[in-house]
Amino acid sequence: MTNTFSRESAQLISRVLGQRLSYVAGPELWHHLSSDLVYLVAEDKVLGFQGDIQSQNFEGFEADYSEIQINEHGESELMEAEEKGNLYYFHSGEKIEQISIIRDTIILSAGERDSWQYTTDVGVLFKLTSGALTISKLGYHDELLQVKYYNDFQIGDLPTTVGHFENSLYETYRVERSVLDIAELS
Amino acid sequence: MGAGYGGGNGSSSVGSLGANIKQLSKKYPLSGGGKFGEPGTGNSRVVVSANPQSTAKEFFEKLGLGGKISPLANGKGIVAKFPDGSRVNFRPKSTSGGPAVDISTSGVSGNQYKIHFVSESDRKRN
């Protein structure tokens, strides 16, 4: 089962490549910099990250799995964010030099075989002139996204995504993470 | 502009999800694994009640006490967020059709699971 960014979404994301970051915002973006709606505003482009859920049954039962929808419209939401003071200017003015997609594959193994695997894009990494920022899912099952800033980014600093998956005597889960350049997807 | 590098102007939220869970467990006992309800599908739990909607609301109100509460932008529910990153989501309508509460606690003993609220008749049908 896959739940990854479409080519159209990847193309939208890649439009801010090479632009200067202005700010990150969201009407409810303040507590731990987490919200289900986050905007990244660059020179003349706006990228909206909307956390949502979709129902799937690849585990053998119906359950909710998070997804990120990308859009480029958010005038009223940005106005609301401004009214509430939820604009964040860290690293403002820095060039977005590289964009990568953070992709997780969760694999359930029962005995010696893999029962299923679920591949999902959990976030986007924006490498800036100095430092970086990520916008990523907090969990595999709900809408909330988190924003993290890094002064000195290391790949091991990428945020962890939490899930309902729990090991038992008979079944074990493992997560394989990859970081893909946006150019590979768009 | 928001305050602080971590956006942490949440000092007005004084509650803790752990404390709220402890309080609610006096009425709805926790399992040996520290979760509410009975085992459901996957890692989810099931709470059976005469009025699933009001019981789910009661869970959210009591678990979300002291948290920063905001609606989800997709209109599918509300979330309470706590200073330590723990959170509780309430969905009046989930994949099962009925209400559900998602619990996500931070820390070493962090737990993430969903509680589906069902009536006795729904429980028998499933």
Image: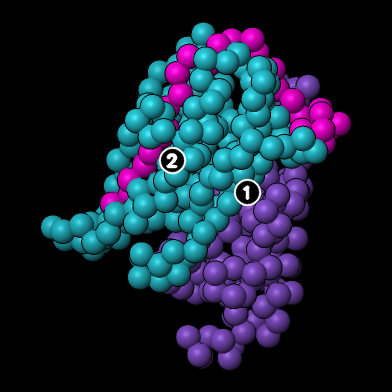
Chain colours: A cyan, B purple
Q: Which residue lies furthest to the right in this view?
A: A83
Give me the residue at 82% from left, 29% from top: A82
Residues marked 1 and 2 touching at CB (< 8 Å):
no
Give me the residue at 35% from left, 70% from top: A60
Circle 1 or circle 2, nearest the eye: 2
Q: Does the magenta stretch include residue A37?
A: no
Q: Circle 2 is placed at which residue position?
A: A7
Quadrant of the drawing holding the N terminus of chain B: top right
Q: How many marks?
A: 2
Q: How crowded is mark 2: few (under 14 residues within 10 Å), some or many (20 or more)?
A: few
- Residue A57 placed where, x, y %? 40, 67
Locate residue B85 relative to residue A106 in the image: left or right: right
- Residue B47 placed where, x, y %? 58, 75
Locate residue A84 relative to residue A48 in the image: left or right: right
- Separation of marks 1 and 2 at Cα, in angstroms: 32 Å
Local SS, label 2: helix
Q: What stretch of residues is rendered in magenta?
A: A78-107
On the image, which quarter does residue B119 sit in?
Answer: bottom right
Q: Does the magenta stretch include residue A82?
A: yes
Vertical relation: A2 (above or below) B54: above
Q: Which residue lies furthest to the left in this view?
A: A112
Amino acid type, mark 1: Arg
- Residue A176 placed where, x, y %? 30, 40
Local SS, label 1: strand
Amino acid type, mark 2: Arg
On the image, which quarter does residue A81 sit in?
Answer: top right
Q: Circle 1 is placed at which residue position?
A: B87
Give me the residue at 41% from left, 33% from top: A186
Q: How crowded is mark 1: few (under 14 residues within 10 Å), some or many (20 or more)?
A: many
Give me the residue at 73% from left, 67% from top: B57
